[in-house]
Amino acid sequence: MKTKTLKKNKVNVITLGCSKNIFDSEVMMAQLKGNKFEVEHESQHDDAEIVIINTCGFIDNAKQESIDTIIRYADAKSEGLVSKVYVTGCLSERYRDELEKEIPEVDAFFGTRELPRLLKTLKADYKHELIGERLLTTPNHYAYFKIAEGCDRPCSFCAIPIMRGKHVSTPIEELVKQAQGLAVKGVKELMLIAQDLTYYGLDIYKKRALAELLDKLADVEGIEWIKLHYAFPSGFPMDVLEVMNKRSNVCNYLDIPLQHGSTRILQAMRRGITREKTEELITEIRAKVPGIAIRTTLIAGYPGETEEDFQEMYDWVERSRFERLGIFTYSHEENTHAHNFEDDVPEDVKRERADRIMELQSGISYELNQAKVGKTFKVLFDRVEGDYFIGRTEFDSPEVDNEVLVKKADYFVRIGDFADVEITSADHYDLYGKVIEK
């Protein structure tokens, strides 16, 4: 029995997982709006007739969150609180058959590349004239900008190729047009994302074309910051650094997941690079772009990781002094190469090793932040929270990196605007400052 009135043709889109899923949800929402649906993202009103859940299937915690969310809305459907529940994204791509059996209340499951079929199920058309259009779920001044889909890398631990397929680059001219459209809407910052940025162009241009793409995007009027996320270290295109130096709106920021600091484990992971080569690459990047902020992610507890392997990674992190670092505990994923091995590092050991790395990184981050006190940085302000305006420097991306806090009582800044901020104090992950009046 229905307990409330639902808005017909209203869709609530729920997004779980990474920025690539956010991008996909934004594209889907634009298509739905183009078909006269009322669309909200993660609505708090719970009055939508239709719920679409865009799931993540990357690691155990993310999969569980997706399953819990599906069950929540399946139960809501049983109670008459929604009429239709659809599931799309990575978890659905990977486990569709099992999900259909376990959660029959869901009306239909769709994979990562089945947006036209999902729309058809809703009696909507896939509108080709809307290709490149998105309804932003982020603040209007920044956007995630997907330049390719899928991945051709053979990393042993990763299920992304299973869920996302082979690497497919979006042509440069299409991406420039998309960037121009976003700039017209007030977007000032683009965060380039893909499963593997550094492979960009090899499939369609038969060469690595990330530098050429960056150069073209930097020409787009209104785009003041461009950041690179998820670059692969093996075969890294060094001409990207030349563009970074040449173009002022290409930020001195690089997200380059390195995964481990032990050559033995890197070889087991099938990463195509050694720790020694990784160190050479990082040294060269820093030499070519002085002051660059390098963000990386690591994995603790890969099958066969000994205390010696971990210590090698720990010592390497201590030497490397990465500006930004995150670490996952290893997740044993079906149908990956690593699933053939015994998941032999106990969970408590994985967590303890990850905690040790983060404690080390916290100290490094604190020291690097103290060196910023007294210096002035250009800051883009994202939001107001409590007593502070909160923004970021060019060396930081939303959600994952450091933030700059300016007291509301002392200064006024508009959200989405830039301001010069002198850093007056700092802790491990936040900077505090005062606006320099012009």
Image (cartoon, rainbow, N blue to C red):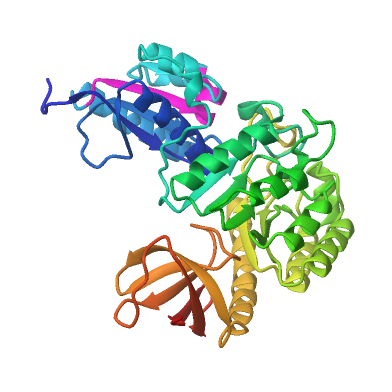
Q: Is residue 368 above or below residue 312?
A: below
Frontmost residue, 90 versus 348 = 90
Image mark count: 0
Q: Position of residue 129 (x, y in %)?
A: 49, 22
* Observer-nearest of 14 and 220: 220
Residue at x-position 53% and y-position 44%: 19
Asked if one can make out residue 86 in the rendered structure from this viewpoint, the answer is yes
Query: Residue 252 location in percent, x, y?
Result: 68, 63
Viewed as shown, does residue 183 lie left or right of 208? left
Name the image quarter holding the N terminus.
Answer: top left
Q: Residue at x 45, y 39 (%)?
A: 16
Please provide percent x and percent y for residue 272. Answer: 85, 44
Quarter of the image where one finds residue 411? bottom left
Task: Say above or below: 238 vs 63.
Answer: below
Query: As drawn, is 218 to the left or to the right of 113?
Result: right
Q: Magenta span covers which residues?
A: 82-96
Q: Residue at x 76, y 71 (%)?
A: 290
In the visual, does 108 lie left or right of 198? left
Res. 333 in view: no
Residue 119: quadrant of the picture: top left
